[in-house]
Amino acid sequence: MKGLLANVLIAIGGAFLLLQAQDLLNSKYIINFLNQNLVSLLIALLAINSASLGIVLSKIRELIDEEKGNGDFSKTKNEMLFSIKEQIVLIFLSLILLMLNDSKWGASHPEYKPAMEMAVITCFTYAMLILFDSARSIFVVLSFKK
């Protein structure tokens, strides 16, 4: 739970910095790009992470078999499942945020636009953190020495 909170705060901080950089440069590139591509990116990242986790699980299975089934990786498996669930939640949350942002309600409430943009960018930065965590797990498992 502590790791989840830390990741959320890091994602919010990263989104804030990106939003400030975008405003400083008087650009709308990031938010326009994410409005058009965020859901596709999140689905692609889910596929990449699922494949990566498959590699990690295969290596873990190999390690368990070499140790004659004495390894307990249930916590690792639960964390992997949690990361998949996080990504699915991000996809649905992004869909909701993008629909709200593009709706008549969003147009009639411009005071919420910065918060909506911040939330959309936060979904993206959080997905990048999940991708980083998955990539790191691959290197940890592949560099494991008996």
Image (spheres, rainbow, N blue to C red):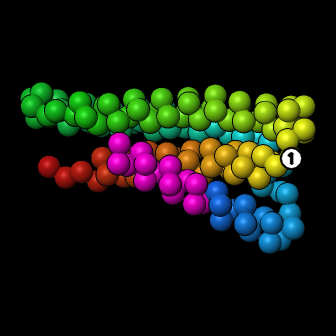
Quadrant placement of the N terminus = top left
Residue 9 magenta-drawn?
Answer: yes
Would you place residue 4 above or below residue 53 in this image?
Answer: below
Secondary structure of residue under mark 1: helix
Residue at 72% across, 40% down = 38
Q: Position of residue 47 (x, y in %)?
A: 56, 32
Camera-side residue of 65 and 74:
74
Q: Residue at x 64, y 28 (%)?
A: 92
| Residues in magenta, as a range | 1-14
Decide if residue 35 is in sight here: yes
In magenta stretch: residue 57: no
Q: Which residue is mark 1?
A: 110
Q: Is 105 left or right of 79, judged from the image as shown?
A: right
The residue drawn where x is 55% and y is 53% is 11
Tell me the residue at 56%/30% (across/down).
89
In depth, the one of 121 and 78 nearer the eye is 121
Tell me residue 101's x, y (percent): 81, 38
One can see residue 129 in this view:
no
Mark 1: amino acid: Pro
The foreground one among 140 and 98 is: 98
Q: Position of residue 36 (x, y in %)?
A: 82, 40
